[in-house]
Image: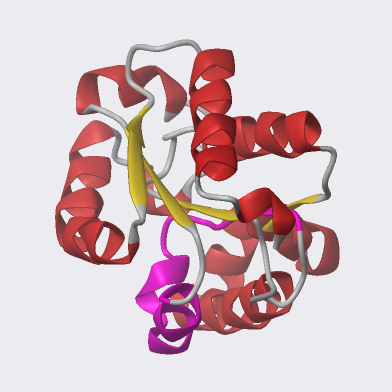
Amino acid sequence: MSGPLAVFIGPMGAGKTRVGKRVAKALGVPFTDSDKVIVARHGAIADIFDTHGEPHFRALERDVVHEALQGSGVVSLGGGAVLAEATRDELRELPVVYLTISADAVASRLGDGKRPLARGGVGDWQRILDARRSVYEGLARVTFDTSRLPIDRIAEDVVDWIRRNGLEYR
């Protein structure tokens, strides 16, 4: 089986990018953040939402995610990437790591206004998580809660999981 060693999914602010970067570095493999690729190619995500709407953003996201899932290393997906059925189909065969976080812990991470679907704060975030939780859980091979442990510790735990499952030799 080819493809990424780990694909991070989960709600906004759970630490998918921060943990993913550390895991990739520890394993000496490339790291791809689908949101960062979108920004590099198309501009700020909030601007895409404001100018073209969410459906346009999701179409751009789907293309970037498909491309990323064909590669290797570690991949971090935006919180809503799992909304696309084609993405869910691709993820079913991959080592998906679901990062969770509590509403209390995420509150301080939502304040920059760059997350267009959570501009209303934790209430918006919770509503979105509630709508997506079953999808995240259904795709996950393993789950880590990022609410209280240091990011470096979570990354170490993910690396251990990858190694225990022989995924680093994919």
Whether residue 76 appears in magenta in the rendering, the answer is yes
- Residue 51 screen position, x and y as percent: 60, 71
Q: Quadrant of residue 101?
A: top left
Residue, x 42% and y 30% (percent of image)?
110
Identify whether 108 is placed above or below 64: above
Residue 114 in sight here: no
- How does the figure colour the protein chain or chains? secondary structure
Horizontal side, residue 4 vs residue 49: left or right:
right
Q: Position of residue 111 (x, y in %)?
A: 45, 25
Extent of the magenta region:
73-92
Q: Viewed as shown, does residue 97 lie left or right of 135?
A: right
**Between 87 and 110, which is closer to the camera in this rendering?**
87
Residue 66 location (% of width, % of height):
64, 80
Query: Residue 158, how many percent across, how many down?
Result: 52, 34
Residue 127 belongs to magenta span = no
Q: Nearer the viewer, residue 82 or 162?
A: 162
Q: Is residue 63 above or below residue 162?
A: below
- In depth, the one of 89 and 46 nearer the eye is 89
**Does 137 sit above or below residue 51?**
above
Is residue 169 found left or right of 158 in the rendered image? right
Q: Quadrant of residue 85?
A: bottom left
Q: Total label count?
A: 0
At x 24%, y 54%, the residue is 128
Residue 69 appears in the figure? yes
Instruction: Identify the residue at horizontal 43%, vertical 55% (top origin).
Output: 79
